[in-house]
Amino acid sequence: MTTIDLRRLHIRPGDVREERLDVELEPFVLGGQRYESAPSHLPVEVEISRASGATIFDLQLDVRVTGPCMRCLAFAEIECHVSAREFNDPDAPKADELRSDYVTDDHLDVGAWARDAIALELPEQILCRPDCAGLCPVCGKDLNAEPHEHTEREPDPRWAALEQFRGV
Ligand SMILES: [Zn+2]
Ligand SMILES: [Zn+2]
C-alpha cells in the first residue's frame, strides 16, 4: 500500500505541494486475460493544495500496459496518460463527493487511487493495432497473416462450369 501521510505535510490554504512516489501495480484482469503495467513500479505525481477547508489532490501518471490482443491474442501494448482529481473535506458528511474514498485517517491511498484511475482510462478493447482483423471464427487462423473468407458451401462444380462458360 502506497500512501501519503497528510498530517506530515501541514498544508495550509494557499499552499501547493508536489509529491512523487512509486506505486506498485498488480496486473489488471480484463476479459479473463492479464494485462501488466510496465514498469510495475510506476512513478506517480500528486499535487496537493487547499482551498476553503477542502484538500485538493491532482494525480498524474503515464502508464504502458501490455498483454494479449483481445482479437488475435498477439502482443499488444497501449500507453495512456492518466490525470484525476479528488477532493477531501474531513467535515463533509460521509459519502459526500467532497469526502474522498481514498483518504483514511489523514492518509491518501495513492496506490488504490492510481489503480482505479488507470482502470477507468483503459480502452474497452486492447488491440495489437486498431484495425486488427482477429482470428477466423471458422478455422481459427490469424486473419492478419492470412486474410481469407469461407464460403458457406463448397461451390457446386456445375456452377463453376457455368461461370466459365459465361466468361468466354
Ligand atoms: Zn490483434
Ligand atoms: Zn478461416
Image (spheres, rainbow, N blue to C red):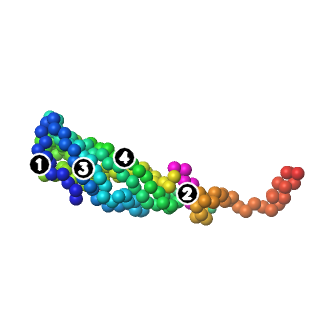
Which labelled disc corresponds to residue 134?
2
Quadrant location of residue 38?
A: bottom left
Q: Residues within 10 Å of mark 3 (few under 14, many from 20)?
A: few
Examine the rendered structure and indicate whether residue 8 appears above or below residue 52.
below
Quadrant location of residue 37?
A: bottom left
127 relative position to 119: left or right: right
Q: Nearer the viewer, mark 2 or mark 3?
A: 3
Q: Give the residue at mark 3.
A: 20
Q: Is residue 70 visible?
A: no
Q: Could you say which is closer to the camera, residue 1 or residue 21?
A: 21
Q: Residues within 10 Å of mark 1 (few under 14, many from 20)?
A: few
Work out how far the residue at label 2 is from the one at label 3, CA to CA, in angstroms: 40 Å
For numbered disc 2, what is the local secondary structure? loop
Q: Give the residue at mark 4.
A: 81
Q: Give the residue at mark 1.
A: 7
For numbered disc 1, what is the local secondary structure? helix
Which labelled disc corresponds to residue 133?
none
- As for residue 61 lying within the magenta part, the answer is no
Magenta residues (range): 130-135
**Label pair 2/1, CB-CB below 8 angstroms:** no
